[in-house]
Image (tube, rainbow, N blue to C red):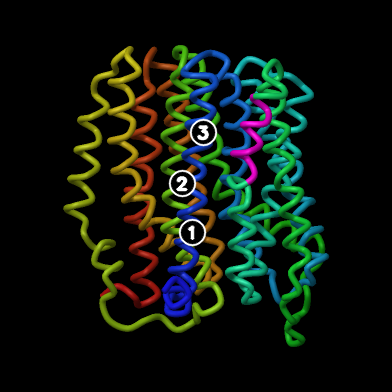
Amino acid sequence: MQLSFLKRSSPYQLAVLIAGSSMGLGLVRELLVLGLLGFTKQNDTLQIYFSIFYTISLTIDALRLSCLNLAGTLSLRRLLLSASLATLPFAASIGLMMSYAAGGLDPSLLGITILGAYLNLLVALLVTYKQKAEAFLAAQLINVLPNFILIPGVVMIYYFSPRDLIAALVTLTAFIPAVQVLLLLALPKTLSLDSEKTPPSLVSSVFIFFYHFSSSLGEQLFQIITRSTFYKFGTGYLSLFSMVVRVYAALRFVLIDSYIGSRLASWKKELAEGQHPLLKLINSAPFALAAALFALTICLKTYNNLSYSAVQIIALLIVGFYFSTLVRIIYFKLNHLDKNIFLVLRFASYELGFAGLAFLLTQEFSQPILALLWVGYIAKPFLQLVFLRKSYEQLGVVE
């Protein structure tokens, strides 16, 4: 019966099943760490290092889009070289900024974290490349590998290295992407080069990564501002926020990224005719506005209580997930169907603008944590959705 289900399932359904299993294990891992450390200052310290991983990983979308632009015109070796020249200094800059905003971190652990985050970006690049080369499920299995390793790793660290728990967990998390890179490189499928296209120079290919990275810089600055604010706000708040955001990101990975990955090999230049259900959501401006205003009412009051704050944060991110889902799918599809530097730069301006607004909030108000979430997870994607709808109209998709 199980074999029959697997045969009938589409790549997207299988990917959701695989990613869903990984997400479940990820939640178990979070509960294990929470059980070991609780909502304590020690856990907050661990989470500030994990925040560096998370913030640097926000470059993954830009990396995948760069890969889609260059795959087929560059060999895999050239693609990895160009990516490394862009991602390694980018990752180092983000790590150093997070350390400064948090008041200083251990240099050795900071270096390990930056190296692990850089390798994690290479994993994302290779997964996208292999998916486009029609090795979708194999790449997806390797992509979800970390949670299958981290759970037994956390247990072993608890028994054998309890005094160096933070250092051991950070080191283990940084080591796993190295294994993933080796496994992905071992997959035999590669893309044949398009003989009709002249391969871009090394400088040009690195520039493509950098201009896509510009679209994620604002979000990364926002995360640095937000997470350092939570870290300084009170004991346990960064641990709470990090746990909720990790669930949020896991759901997005299972439901949205799996969908995007399953379509990379089949998305064509031609646009579908007629009104797709997704487009109806895009056009639902009154519902989107009502959702944004509802979220605003939630963040009008800040409680110095973890339980109350948890309810507020979860409610805000549920609304944010709706906006993020639409923005993420539309933005990927537009970039895949039409290479438009104006679209990328305009998108980047939204990210930077809202990061600047978040910074101003931290300077003008003493307790802006919920307002920060509304700005970054509600207001920003709401306006991005309005902009992307106009881009869809220009391509003749929205009537």
Tell me the residue at 79%/72% (across/down): 75
Q: Please give the range of residues in magenta.
A: 149-158
Magenta segment, principal secondary structure? Answer: helix
SS at circle 3: helix
Which residue occupies 53% across, 66% down?
Answer: 261
Q: In the image, what residue occupies the spot 24% across and 67% down?
A: 280
Distance between the alpha carbons at the discs numbered 1 and 3: 20 Å
From the image, tell me which residue sits under label 1.
257
Circle 2: residue type:
Gly
For the residues bearing labels 1 and 3, Cβ distance under 8 angstroms: no
Q: Earlier in the sequence, mark 1 or mark 2?
A: 2
Residue position marked by numbered label 2 in the rendering: 24
Q: Is residue 217 left or right of residue 281?
A: right
**Chain-order first, disc 3 or disc 2:** 2
Q: Please state which amino acid type lies under the numbered disc 1.
A: Asp
Above or below, comparing residue 260 to residue 265 in the picture: above
Task: Report the front residue among 190 and 60.
Answer: 190
Viewer-nearest of discs 1 and 3? 1
Is residue 264 placed above or below 114 in the rendered structure?
below
Q: Looking at the picture, how far across and down is residue 343, in whole percent?
A: 49, 60
Is 237 rendered above or below residue 330?
above
Q: Is residue 317 left or right of residue 111?
A: left
* Above/below status of 165 relative to 326: above
Provide the secondary structure element on which disc 2 rests. Answer: helix
| Residue ID at (45%, 46%) | 350
Place residue 81 in its image quadrant.
bottom right
Most foreground residue, 335 or 72 = 72
Residue 212 forms part of the magenta stretch: no
